[in-house]
Image (cartoon, rainbow, N blue to C red):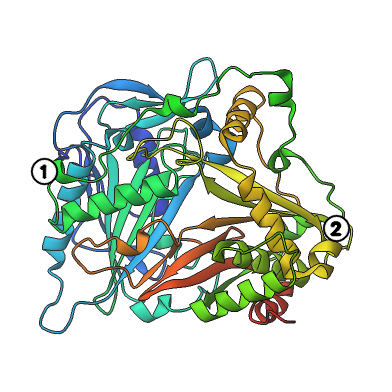
């Protein structure tokens, strides 16, 4: 095993797991293995932790301190990406060997942490405060095994009833990623009907969506024994200096306004509403026919210069308009939509294959409620398209300089953030239990997520939480493109 037993401790609650992580963050000892006693210890009414263990790389890895890029270090990314992958029960007669599957997952994690050894380190601020760095001493990632006496696979075929309903499927929530917690947490939970979930938390400072999906697919290929350690593709690449700021060419370079970092007036108590009102999770699936209908509607309502739109552009615009209309905001309130734009092939020189750091910037479109509602889907789609097309090498250089020199960060007033998980490859992550039946977040909140749909390559599932007073209207509008 790649983690030794030292002073075993019993886990009783989420809090005690967190305390263990904090207590052990500075230790130079080998990582500890935590086991519960034979009696299961209850964490709420639905999920029980059987074991938690700190897994370290199964081979020696470099002991060093690695600097994160300016893009990695920005304030906006100092949180944990939390994925939830749900797997079907095995067919009758082929039931999952729980012990074998758990052992393979732990062993594969220890293998994956060899090439991805920074995920076994700890992230901290540099002494001069200029950026972040990773202390790589093979401190380890946290692996948790749990069982549920309530959930079955059918629970994941609809939106959760509350934002935090599935919280316990990733028992350790790392709120502050710079306090010494493991940057990677994996929880395998066996469900009541023999299905399984894999919850994953990854420090966003270390990986973006593409990078984290590449890691998960490599981890899964090792667990399912489809590839060996030397056969992983792509092999991970560090090279974080590629997205550090370069010397500006002229004063104009740094003075260009980036809408994602500007503030708009809060004319309607926007932040108070989203803080105080209960949010209701929603889940809507858009099949290929519906997406084509949106494209046709947007194209017919656009100028002749706008020849075509992608599914992402029209769906983002449609969700943005439905969200805005449902909230009943003042007509002069300015709203924004923020979304990630992958820059791996947009900058020169290009970012190498296997780069798993943050290689994206935020595209931003902005409009008043009045314009967003009255000018229709074509106008909103054109705004999203234009925001994407602005991103080039110079744009990325300016963003790197802004987040490095002035700690620029997006505001929350009037903002809808969209993250496209539907094209990351998460739907292919097979740990030996087949491909996921469901891919989504641990918690469905005000971040809007575009998710893959099982067996429907061109379909998209959209999950977002809406204030309770607006959710019925949103659900109507999002399903009614001509409303």
Q: Nearer the viewer, residue 214 or 168?
A: 214
Q: Nearer the viewer, residue 292 or 222?
A: 292
Please provide percent x and percent y for residue 252.
74, 23
Question: What residue do we see at 47% from left, 33% from top?
Answer: 178
Question: Is residue 110 positioned above or below 194 on the image?
Answer: above
Q: Residue furthest front?
A: 304
Q: Quadrant of the C terminus?
A: bottom right
Question: What residue do we see at 60% from left, 41% from top?
Answer: 391
Q: Nearer the viewer, residue 94 or 349?
A: 349
Q: Is residue 41 visible?
A: no
Question: What residue do we see at 68% from left, 51% from top?
Answer: 386
> Which numbered dot is residue 268?
2
Query: Relative to 170, is 117 on the left or the right?
Result: left
Which residue position holds label 1? Answer: 1
- Mark 2 Cα-neighbour bin, 10 Å: few <14, some 14–19, many ≥20: some
Please provide percent x and percent y for residue 217.
28, 53
Please provide percent x and percent y for residue 454.
37, 74
């Amino acid at each position: 095993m790649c983690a030794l037993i030292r002073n075993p401790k019993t886990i009783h609650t989420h809090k005690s797991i967190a305390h263990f992580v904090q207590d052990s963050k500075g230790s130079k000892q080998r990582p500890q293995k935590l086991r519960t006693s034979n009696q299961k210890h209850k964490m709420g009414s639905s999920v029980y932790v059987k074991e938690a263990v700190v897994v370290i790389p199964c081979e020696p890895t470099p002991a060093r301190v690695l600097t994160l890029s300016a893009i990695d270090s920005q304030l906006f990314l100092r949180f944990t990406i939390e994925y939830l992958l749900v797997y079907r029960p095995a067919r009758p007669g082929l039931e999952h060997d729980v012990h074998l599957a758990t052992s393979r997952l732990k062993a594969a994690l220890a293998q994956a942490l060899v090439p991805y050894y920074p995920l076994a380190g700890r992230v901290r601020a540099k002494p001069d405060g200029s950026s972040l760095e990773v202390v790589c001493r093979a401190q380890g990632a946290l692996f948790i095994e749990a069982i549920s006496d309530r959930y079955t696979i059918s629970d994941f075929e609809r939106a959760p009833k509350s934002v935090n309903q599935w919280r316990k499927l990733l028992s350790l929530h790392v709120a502050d990623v710079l306090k010494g917690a493991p940057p990677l947490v994996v929880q395998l939970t066996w469900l009541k009907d023999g299905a399984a979930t894999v919850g994953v938390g990854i420090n966003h400072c270390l990986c973006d969506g593409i990078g984290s999906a590449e890691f998960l697919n490599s981890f899964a290929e090792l667990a399912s024994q489809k590839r060996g350690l030397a056969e992983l593709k792509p092999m991970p690449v560090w090279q974080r200096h590629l997205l550090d700021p370069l010397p500006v060419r002229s004063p104009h370079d740094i003075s260009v306004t980036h809408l994602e970092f500007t503030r708009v007036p809060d004319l309607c108590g926007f932040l108070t509403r989203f803080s105080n009102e209960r949010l209701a999770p929603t889940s809507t699936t858009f099949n290929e026919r519906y997406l084509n209908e949106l494209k046709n509607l947007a194209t017919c309502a656009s100028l002749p210069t706008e020849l075509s739109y992608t599914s992402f552009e029209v769906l983002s615009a449609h969700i943005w308009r439905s969200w805005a209309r449902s909230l009943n905001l003042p007509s002069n309130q300015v709203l924004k939509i923020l979304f990630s734009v992958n820059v791996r092939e947009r900058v020169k020189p290009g970012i190498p294959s296997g780069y798993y750091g943050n290689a994206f910037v935020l595209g931003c479109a902005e409009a008043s409620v009045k314009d967003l509602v009255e000018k229709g889907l074509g106008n909103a789609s054109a705004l999203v398209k234009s925001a994407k097309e602005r991103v080039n090498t110079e744009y990325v250089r300016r963003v790197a300089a802004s987040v490095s020199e002035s700690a620029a960060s997006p505001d929350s007033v009037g903002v809808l953030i969209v993250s496209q998980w539907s094209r990351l490859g998460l739907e292919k992550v097979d740990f030996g239990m087949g491909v996921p039946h469901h891919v989504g977040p641990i918690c469905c909140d005000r971040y809007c997520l575009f998710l893959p749909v099982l067996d429907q390559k061109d379909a998209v599932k959209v999950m977002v939480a809406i204030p309770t007073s607006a959710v019925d209207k949103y659900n109507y509008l999002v399903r009614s493109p001509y409303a």
